[in-house]
Image (cartoon, rainbow, N blue to C red):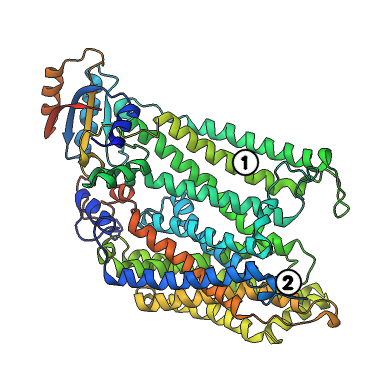
């Protein structure tokens, strides 16, 4: 029989699993944690300042202008929505495929999804220019007719896709946490702690009849999230693909966007898990090098898919015989934004090839650096799609450049402050690894198992 | 006693008295649950920190019927999405957009799809909470370790043929490390 590596290291028992995972919630964290929170809060302040100025004085604070009307807000929105997709892939799709290794990273990956979607959601709302009227995006009975939204518009599809995704991911994440919140409640010594976690746990007590329904709903939510996550980035790609603009109007966009989303999302999971492993050394027993290696393999695979899409776009431009389409792609690779194109190729296609080698797949500092490069590359991919298609279209008299301002940079870098603040607060307040689920995979790969009932 | 404690007393769910046993090993618990059921008890509960293999079969719990609720809610979401996009675009305020027909069905597919998922997911979670009787305010917990590393059985007083001495002996014979009167 082929032996499997254990999913949990260090001869843990059910009791020590509970204690280890609750330790971050129940004890004061290391100084490194506070340093991280401080850094995230600093970036968050930059974000609030930049976006506050943009709301107060208007969109002119940013680089968007004719002919490039979609800039930082749309690029960074697609970037963050894409990040979220890996979380759902780990928590839902790998669950349906019975990939037991997903168990210890699913909770934090799902949290990453929720926070990435929250961060992403701020951008299109601010991009409307009048965020106080953002509720006009929803079809509600109003005194203007009622005038309904245009259901034929991909932007309205996007409102439905992203809001459904945010709702379902948040509910899935929370329902998954209920039994663990009950564990923290039962361990609480302090009266207020017991009450607050008691409320959060909804009074869960883990009876067999409840687990029966619970497991069924967990599987149903996985089954519903799987087509949902694939639809979300497909619909995001429709924002571009439905427009008749060279560089946007491509049938390859939905799968290309979904592959890119999973690629960037897994890179972000690797970044976060590398950080968590350092902040909470005891988690190294649960998020092992085997987990990191598996994720790096997925990064490499999806990186190849993204590289294939880049090549395919060039081929189709040539094969179509449409000179506008051909010009757009030659302009991408050799025009004024060529530097951005080659950053994208280097980060997304060339650097992940290092993961062919086992050494890089299992070396934390290396994979941390590579995962950061992937995320830089994926931001530039969305930059390429959005800006270079717009800046030189059919009429040369209509050409122009997009030059970001300091406020663009504030919004981009600041959004990491929002994301990391939410994430760091989450790992301190909630069980960052699923306590209940990890116990069910404790015996995987152990010598003979403790009970030998497999 | 502070004010919150007084309020909690009013909304606490009604609990039952009975006998509880605690096990260290989940396989022994599943075997014990089977024996307790074979002894004629039906209203007893097994409490575990994670879902147990074989407990449903041992206790005679049927497969959850929530998938049917998901199906009904999902179909409702789909029907609602179809009806609403048609009604808003072709009936209530028809507008010609891009030369498309008033009821341009392919363009409405994304809305119909998303509403199917949204209603299906929220309906399933609503059904879960309803069937589990959640949320509950501060329900009695037999032992704090039952959500961490130990496994429990609870037989309520109102169960058929309840006999506390017999149950206590049965539980000890089945390997319970602790047997006590409890509230659940």
Q: Residue at x 64, y 80 (%)?
A: A404
| In the displayed structure image, the side of residue A107 where residue B112 appears, left or right | right
Position of residue A89 measured from the top left corner of the image (x, y, whole percent): 49, 56
**Residue B171 or residue B157, whichever sits in front:** B157
Compared with residue A422, is residue A172 higher up or lower down, i.e. above or below? Answer: above
Which residue carries the number 1 mark?
B116
Where is the C terminus of chain A found, in terms of image quarters?
top left
Task: State the separation of the CA atoms marked 1 and 2.
Answer: 33 Å
Q: Residue at x 80, y 76 (%)?
A: A393
**What is the quadrant of residue A381 in the picture?**
bottom right
Where is the N terminus of chain A found, in terms of image quarters?
bottom left
**Which chain is indicated by disc 2?**
A
**What is the quadrant of residue A348 in the picture?**
bottom right
Label ID, residue A258 = none
Compared with residue B52, is residue A353 higher up or lower down, i.e. above or below? Answer: below
Which residue carries the number 2 mark?
A69
**What is the quadrant of residue A162 in the picture?**
bottom right
Crowd band around label 1 with a 10 angstrom C-alpha radius: few (<14), some (14–19), many (20+): many
| In the displayed structure image, the side of residue A262 where residue B88 appears, left or right | right
Count of numbered tags: 2
**Which chain is indicated by disc 1?**
B
**Residue A371 or residue A77, whichever sits in front:** A77
| In the displayed structure image, the side of residue A130 where residue A363 appears, left or right | left
């Amino acid at each position: 029989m082929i032996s499997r590596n254990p999913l949990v290291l260090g001869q843990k028992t059910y009791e020590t699993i509970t204690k280890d995972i609750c330790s971050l919630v129940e004890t004061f964290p290391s100084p490194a944690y506070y340093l991280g929170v401080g850094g995230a809060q600093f970036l968050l302040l930059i974000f609030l300042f930049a976006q506050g100025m943009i709301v107060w004085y208007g969109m002119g604070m940013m680089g968007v202008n004719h002919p490039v009307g979609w800039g930082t807000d749309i690029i960074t929105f697609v970037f963050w929505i894409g990040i979220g997709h890996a979380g759902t892939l780990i928590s839902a799709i790998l669950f349906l495929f019975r990939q037991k290794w997903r168990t210890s990273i699913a909770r934090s990956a799902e949290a990453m999804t929720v926070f990435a979607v929250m961060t992403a959601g701020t951008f299109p709302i601010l991009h409307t220019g009048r965020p106080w009227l953002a509720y006009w995006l929803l079809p509600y009975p109003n005194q203007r007719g009622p005038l309904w939204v245009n259901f034929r518009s991909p932007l309205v599809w996007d409102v439905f896709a992203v809001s459904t995704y945010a709702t379902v991911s948040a509910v899935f994440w929370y329902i998954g946490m209920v039994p663990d919140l009950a564990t923290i409640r039962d361990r609480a010594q302090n009266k207020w702690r017991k009450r607050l976690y008691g409320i959060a746990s909804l009074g869960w007590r883990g009876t067999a009849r409840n687990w029966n329904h619970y497991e069924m709903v967990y599987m149903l939510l996985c089954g519903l999230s799987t087509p949902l996550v694939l639809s979300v980035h497909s619909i995001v790609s429709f924002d571009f693909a439905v427009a008749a603009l060279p560089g946007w109007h491509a049938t390859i966009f939905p799968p290309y966007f979904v592959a890119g989303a999973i690629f960037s999302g897994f890179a972000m999971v690797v970044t976060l898990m590398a950080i968590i492993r350092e902040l909470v050394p005891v988690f190294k027993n649960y998020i092992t090098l085997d987990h990191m290696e598996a994720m790096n393999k997925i990064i490499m695979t999806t990186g190849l898919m993204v590289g294939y899409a880049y090549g395919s776009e060039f081929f189709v431009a040539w094969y179509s015989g449409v000179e506008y389409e051909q010009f757009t792609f030659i302009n991408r690779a050799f025009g004024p934004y060529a530097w951005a194109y080659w950053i994208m190729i280097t980060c997304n296609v060339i650097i992940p090839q290092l993961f062919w080698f086992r050494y890089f797949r299992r070396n934390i500092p290396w994979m941390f650096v590579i995962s950061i490069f992937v995320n830089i590359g994926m931001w530039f991919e969305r930059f390429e799609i959005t800006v270079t298609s717009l800046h030189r279209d059919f009429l040369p008299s209509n050409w122009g450049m997009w030059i970001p301002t300091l406020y663009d940079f504030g919004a981009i870098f600041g959004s990491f402050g929002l994301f990391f603040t939410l994430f760091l607060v989450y790992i301190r307040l909630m069980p960052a690894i699923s306590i209940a689920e990890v116990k069910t995979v404790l015996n995987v790969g152990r010598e003979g198992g403790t009970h030998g009932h497999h | 006693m502070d004010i919150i404690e007084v309020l909690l007393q009013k909304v606490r769910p009604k609990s039952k008295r009975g006998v509880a046993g605690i096990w260290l090993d989940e396989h022994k618990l599943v075997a014990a649950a089977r024996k307790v059921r074979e002894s004629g008890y039906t209203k007893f509960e097994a409490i575990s920190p994670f879902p147990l293999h074989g407990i449903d079969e041992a206790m005679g719990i049927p497969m959850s019927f929530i998938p049917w609720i998901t199906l009904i809610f999902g179909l409702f979401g789909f029907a609602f999405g179809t009806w609403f996009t048609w009604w808003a675009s072709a009936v209530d305020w028809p507008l010609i957009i891009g030369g498309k027909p008033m009821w341009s069905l392919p363009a409405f597919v994304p809305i119909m799809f998303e509403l199917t998922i949204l209603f299906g997911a929220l309906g399933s979670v609503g059904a879960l909470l309803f069937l589990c009787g959640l949320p509950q305010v501060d329900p009695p917990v037999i032992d704090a370790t039952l959500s961490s590393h130990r496994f429990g059985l609870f037989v309520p007083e109102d169960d058929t043929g309840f006999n506390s001495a017999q149950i206590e002996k049965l539980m000890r014979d089945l390997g319970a490390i602790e047997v006590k009167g409890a509230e659940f």
